[in-house]
Amino acid sequence: MATEKNRKKEPGKVAQLRTPVLDMLSKAAGKSFNYKQIAAKLNVEDKNLRRELAQLLHRMKEDGDLAETGPGKYRVKRLERPHLVGKVDMTATGATFVICEGVDRDVFISPRKVRHALPGDTVKVYVYVNHRNNKLEGEIVEVVQRARELFVGTLSVTRHFAFMVPDDPRMPVDFYIAKDEMHGAVDGDKVQVRLLDWPESAHNPMGRVENVLGPPGEHQTEMQSILAGYDFPLCFPPKVEAEAEAISDCIDKAEVARRRDMRKVPTFTIDPTDAKDFDDALSFQSLSSGLFEVGVHIADVSHYVRPGTALDAEAIERATSVYMVDRVVPMLPEKLSNHVCSLRPDEDKLTYSAAFEIDMDGKVHREWFGRTVTRSQRRFTYDQAQEVIETGKGDMATEIDAMWQIASKLRAGRFKNGALVFEKDEVKFNLDAEGNPTGIYIKQYKDSNKLIEEFMLLANRQVAESIGKPRIGSARTYVYRIHDEPNQEKLELLVEMAATFGHRVELGPRKTLARSLNKLLDDIKGRPEENLLGTMTIRSMAKAVYSTENIGHYGLGFTHYSHFTSPIRRYPDVLAHRLLTHYLEGGRSANANELEQVCEHCSDMERKASEAERTSVKYMQAKFLLSRVGDEFDGVITGVTDWGLYVEIKENRCEGMIRLRDLTDDFYDFDERTMTVTGSRTGRSYRLGDDMRVRVTAVSLEKKQVDMAPVNIEGDDMGFRPSPNWMKPLTKGRTKHGGRDKGRGKSSGKGGKGKRR
């Protein structure tokens, strides 16, 4: 860069040419120019200034800004890798960025340089530095891989052709649909369209209607649109269904003979009341040694779903089951998920088991992993098991009581060793026969949930440790569930914010920090600052993902952790079973590169499933409030952005938004660091976690949006009004402070038994 000494030597006029020179050469795609050519492009006609420009170019070469490619010919110094590959991130405001691995800044793409890229596409981008603002900019030169081929939107039919207007507000174009590609769809239908072609000279991509989802606004249409919008298939291919139906319900005697027979050991399942797929069971028996054997028995999906089959290919593609408000979209066909593999009571089942010889303090003395045949004698719901824990009476009371005591010790040990406590309430809906919400309730996390969770965590940890740090031999490739360390900057902000409420967060080693955060979360329960500090704590955490590169699980405090216990609904668990079998049989370490690609896909599909589940909740919340437009509620601010305040109604947990542009009493400025908006005239501020009285002003089922207005604040009666554009999608993009919207970081989802770990 230019030295201060060189800058001082430059006359005023020529000094002003530094930035235009850099901009002009940066946009010239690496071409070289002499001073005359540069002067012509910059419209420098004065002869003296042209001579000074020649000297300026030489100084810029010395400063390292330019490279001299020949006598008197210059170009801007290239980045080490001017052509990068990354993923396209588009915002609803029309801004486009490319996120490249190994580059700490996103690459901005101007609209005319987006080419034919769409959100999520993998692209090759030519990158240069904009020397006006020192930001990376680029031009997409090639779409390497489409993120998706199917898109959801509303059909608009003209006389000779049709257009599909995508639901996704980030999509920059509509799809052209020829008359013979409409396949029965009519004007106004919600449809799923396949991208067929996008000629270089065409403004719009060409598509074909694959599925007619139905009229917008109808319950079935909207729920299917959510699934299709996140790329989840609406049905299984015939070949997959045929393979599933061909699987026998009967267990071959020869297969039983190859397994450890545990059918006579007291065994039971604990699941939600409405569960249909039971993929884990527990067994308990006393041993002559004075120890106890706890068995964690998991449906042996890998026995039925073999590599190279259509079933396996479909399971890989789906990667996970999706738990919508009113339905489950399974990873496996119903024949497997609800019947053959499901550990239903009083049926012999093929299982994969982890058996632990354990004492009442939760110390594991011996462990065994292998294939078994088991038989569940009792199916408990969580409420039924909770009653046994509380009363000490009922079926299998002795076994459940002993296991609860052991689970309590395991749980206490985890927290002592640095595990974090995140127990967030889960919102559930009461639905009528048509799927309409009639009420909302909070699913409580009880001791029966904790009992199941602890033994699932134990199995997941011990299996991962047996492969990742074996007593004999070296570690082998495995599929781990990893969770990185928290974001230090966000933790420091949490420390500052907690201090304003009189709480102390101690940063330091993992155990110290975990102990301090757990104390904070316990201290703020029921206090006004609970939502603010709890949300900030969650936001400081990384997201758990699947990987063959083990870095441990920070949140659980485990050095080794896998997902082994839910193969009916998670494909990584199927892989974990296959790998364990391979290693138990003496196989060599698996190919890490191939497995890592599957891990990345599974992590991506899990994220999509979580987003689809949250979207279905938003739809049901909007539906529940449709008849409550005009009603007032007490709420709490759960999100603060530069476009609005998100408010959750306390009595029913429904969330809506107040747009800042609708707060007409003042101009509000957003502070991203403190999650606060403040009025420039009145000084009135709204912060994450603040209580607020609100009125529901409008509801859109298609947009899954609830609009709200503040009640009883100065200015509300002086012109507050819902925006006439309330039906438009929420704006998400660059804030006025230059940061790209990363979402509000709210946690939700399932895993284990109701949580994703």
Image (tube, grey):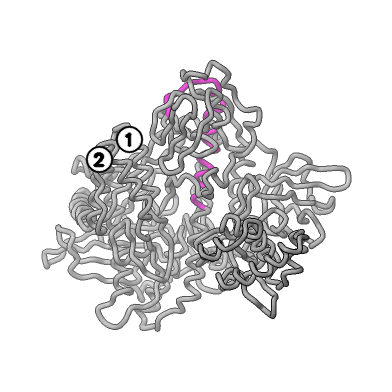
Q: Nearer the viewer, mark 1 or mark 2?
A: 2
Q: Say if 749 sits above or below 300 in the image.
A: above
The front one of 496 and 213 is 496
In x, y percent, where is residue 112?
72, 55
Residue 630: within the magenta?
A: yes
Q: Describe residue 411's horizontal placement relative to residue 430 as left or right.
A: left
Binning the other alpha carbons within 10 Å of mark 1 as few (below 14), some (14 to 19) or many (20 upward) gives: some
- The residue carrying mark 1 is 529
The spot of residue 110 in percent (x, y) is: 67, 55
Q: Secondary structure at mark 2?
A: loop
Q: Is residue 207 left or right of residue 170?
A: right
Range drawn in magenta: 609-635
Check residue 535 for magenta coloring. Answer: no
Contact? badges 1 and 2 (CB < 8 Å):
yes
Point out residue 367 in the picture as x, y percentages from the top left corner.
24, 70
Badge number at residue 503: 2
Amino acid type of disc 2? His
Quadrant of res 47: bottom right
Of callouts 1 and 2, the N-terminal one: 2
Residue name at image x 22 percent, y 58 percent: 417
